[in-house]
Structure formats: structure tokens, C-alpha cells
Image (cartoon, rainbow, N blue to C red):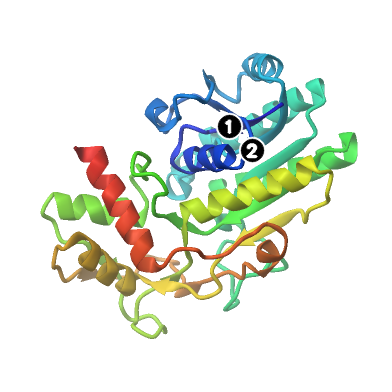
């Protein structure tokens, strides 16, 4: 019996694979390598290069590796780009999820942990986001993740699917120096690339109603995130009922200025970030409560901000060497 990790060659998926290994569960990776890297998959883990849109490939993988559950991380994850590529976003994240669920139903695989996103909330008007906060996505990406949650909900009614969705906030750090965040849109890679290229990183706005005037966000270490995926898989495997969705959040948040200071300390590169104008629609603060996940999914912040930044920088340096 094994757990299929879709998108297991990506930054987050590869950490989930390692967490499954550490828990003595057997992962199998299915990934089309559109944004992942085969080198991120441990040598001992079976790897199938295929898209979740290829239902026959998913069926063959389920059969060959005796898959009993799925951790669904695959998808098109760039919220900003999704505005320019809505059809591609829906195809990857909605049609892909529906195709995966159809294959699971065909083979009687009835457990899934879904990689959702804080983007389902849009721009919440509360200081602390909880699972009861209204979902109001503002991009095709956020909408596609919410639809993914609905698909799981409806399959639960139709065929008895056991499921939960994990809503991530800002995932950073590295639990293995061979696995790094390669996204061209995330804060840490953008700042690291600027420093490596000799450019000065930029902060978008420093006049927000926050303690230091810069945006406050929830930053989570990717290895902590992976542990909660395994906890969810184990509980589903044991036949236990989980909440439909969980926020993985810190409850506190860190400002962009604090991130910049931590990066300067971790890299040893002294810099003063440039200050640009606010980005339209960028909220001052988005922070989530992780209390529900702490109760059910062994969720906690095991890493300090310094450890998040240092681990991410070390992985970035190893990738460049």
C-alpha cells in the first residue's frame, strides 16, 4: 500500500515525500515536471512522469503501486499569472483534480489530502483568518483552489470520499538543502536572486498601518507543513474524520521589513531595501490561526524566522553550485 503524491517533484511536494518516508509510509510520485525537478525525488521513491490530466496514466500508477491514498499537491500555483492565463489555470487545477478524482473512484481509492491555499480567502477584512472566515477568492488561482475543495466535498457525498484540504499561507525555508523554492514569483527567491545578481531588493510600500509600515504576512517552514500532510494521511488511513479544511498559519505574522533584516543577517550581505509604491489591492496584514490544525494535525511552528531564512539560503546556494 502506498500514498501517491501528485506534484511530488515540486518544492512542497518533495518535502511531503520526505515526510512520508520519515513516517515509514511509502510515497509514489506523479509529476509532469512543468515546474518540478526529477532531482527533487529521492532515489528510492518510484517516479512517474505524467500529468494528472492523463487519467490513464493515473490509473496505471494506482494499479502498479497499489495506491491506497493520495496527497494532491500538483497544480498551477501562480496567482498573479493566473489572471492572464485563466483557462490554463482552470484546466490544471480544476479539470486535473476532477480527472484525478475520477481515477480514484474507478479504483476505489477513497482518501485524499488536498493542497489548497490562503488564496481562497481573497483579501479578508479580519485581523486573524480562521476556517470560518468567508471565502472570497480574487484570482482564477484562488477560485480554482476553492472549486477543488468543492469537488472533494461533492465526491464525499457521491462516493464516500474521505478528505481534507490544507490551506497554506506563505511557505518558505528548506528541510533538505537539495530542495529549494524555484518559483519566479515568491518573495524569498526574488530577494535571493536580486542579491546574487548584485541588485537591491525592493519593498512595495512602507506606509501601511503596521508596526513598521510594511505588510505583515504569515510565513511557514515547508518541513512543518509537510509533517501536517503526513498527520492528515495517517488519520484518514485510520478511518478518522477530519475537518473539511484547515488553515496552516502562525497566528502572528512577520513584516516584510523583518524578512529583509533576517535575510541580510543570514546571507551576510548588508543592504538597505529600496522602497517602492504600494501594489494595488495589497492588504496590510494577512495572518491565520492554526489552532484547528494544531488540534488535529500535529501543526506547530517548529522553526524560527532565522532558521527559515538560513535554510532557504543554504538550499539556494547549493542549487547554484
Q: Earlier in the sequence, mark 2 or mark 1?
A: 1
Tell me the quadrant of the picture where the C terminus can be found: top left
Pointer 1: residues within 10 angstroms few (<14), some, or many (20+)?
many
Q: Position of residue 56 (x, y in %)?
A: 66, 14
Residue in the picture at 34% in, 57% down? 187
**Where residue 54 sits in the image (x, y, percent)?**
61, 18
| Placement of 206 over or under 27, stated as above or below | below
Residue placed most toward the observer, 207 or 176: 176
Mark 2, other Cα within 10 Å: few <14 / some 14–19 / many ≥20: many
Using the image, tell me which numbered label, if any, was put on residue 71.
2
In the shown orientation, is residue 85 left or right of residue 315? right
**Rendered image: mark on residue 6:** 1
Regarding residue 95, the answer to whether it shows in the image is yes
Residue under the image location 55 percent in, 48 percent down: 226
Q: Position of residue 131 (x, y in %)?
A: 70, 65
Query: Are discs 2 and 1 less than 8 Å apart at CB?
Result: yes
Q: Is residue 26 left or right of residue 108?
A: left
Q: Position of residue 174 (x, y in %)?
A: 39, 50
From this view, report whether residue 32 is shown above or below residue 212.
above
Q: Residue furthest left?
A: 198
Q: Quadrant of residue 214?
A: bottom left
Q: Is residue 12 above or below residue 159?
A: below
Look at 38% across and 80% down and name the residue there.
208
> From where the camera sits, is residue 142 visible?
no
Q: What secondary structure is marked by label 2?
A: strand
Amino acid at each position: 500500500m502506498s500514498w501517491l503524491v501528485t506534484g511530488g517533484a515540486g518544492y512542497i511536494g518533495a518535502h511531503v515525500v520526505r515526510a512520508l518516508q520519515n513516517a515509514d509510509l511509502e510515497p509514489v510520485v506523479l509529476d509532469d515536471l512543468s515546474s518540478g525537478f526529477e532531482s527533487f525525488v529521492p532515489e528510492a521513491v518510484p517516479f512517474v512522469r505524467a500529468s494528472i490530466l492523463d487519467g490513464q496514466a493515473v490509473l496505471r500508477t494506482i494499479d502498479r503501486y497499489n495506491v491506497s491514498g493520495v496527497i494532491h499537491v500538483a497544480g498551477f500555483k501562480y496567482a498573479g499569472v493566473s489572471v492572464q492565463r485563466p483557462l490554463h489555470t482552470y484546466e490544471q487545477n480544476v479539470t486535473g483534480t476532477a480527472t484525478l478524482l475520477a481515477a480514484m473512484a474507478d479504483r476505489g481509492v477513497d482518501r485524499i489530502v488536498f493542497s489548497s491555499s490562503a488564496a481562497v480567502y481573497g483579501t479578508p477584512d479580519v485581523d486573524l483568518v480562521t476556517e470560518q472566515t468567508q471565502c472570497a477568492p480574487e484570482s482564477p488561482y484562488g477560485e480554482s483552489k476553492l472549486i477543488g475543495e468543492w469537488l472533494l466535498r461533492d465526491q464525499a457525498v457521491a462516493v464516500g470520499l474521505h478528505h481534507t484540504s490544507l490551506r497554506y499561507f506563505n511557505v518558505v525555508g528548506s528541510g533538505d538543502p537539495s530542495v529549494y523554492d524555484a518559483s519566479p514569483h515568491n518573495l524569498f527567491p526574488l530577494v535571493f536572486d536580486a542579491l546574487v545578481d548584485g541588485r537591491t531588493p525592493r519593498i512595495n510600500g512602507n506606509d501601511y498601518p503596521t508596526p513598521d509600515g510594511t505588510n505583515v504576512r504569515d510565513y511557514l517552514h515547508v518541513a512543518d507543513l509537510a509533517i501536517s500532510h503526513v498527520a492528515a494521511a495517517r488519520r484518514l488511513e485510520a478511518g478518522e474524520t477530519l475537518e473539511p479544511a484547515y488553515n496552516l498559519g502562525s497566528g502572528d505574522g512577520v513584516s516584510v521589513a523583518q524578512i529583509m533584516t533576517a535575510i541580510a543577517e543570514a546571507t551576510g550581505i548588508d543592504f538597505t531595501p529600496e522602497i517602492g509604491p504600494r501594489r494595488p489591492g495589497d492588504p496590510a496584514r494577512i495572518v491565520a490561526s492554526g489552532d484547528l490544525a494544531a488540534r488535529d494535525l500535529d501543526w506547530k511552528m517548529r522553526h524560527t524566522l532565522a532558521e527559515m531564512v538560513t535554510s532557504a539560503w543554504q538550499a539556494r546556494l547549493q542549487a547554484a553550485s
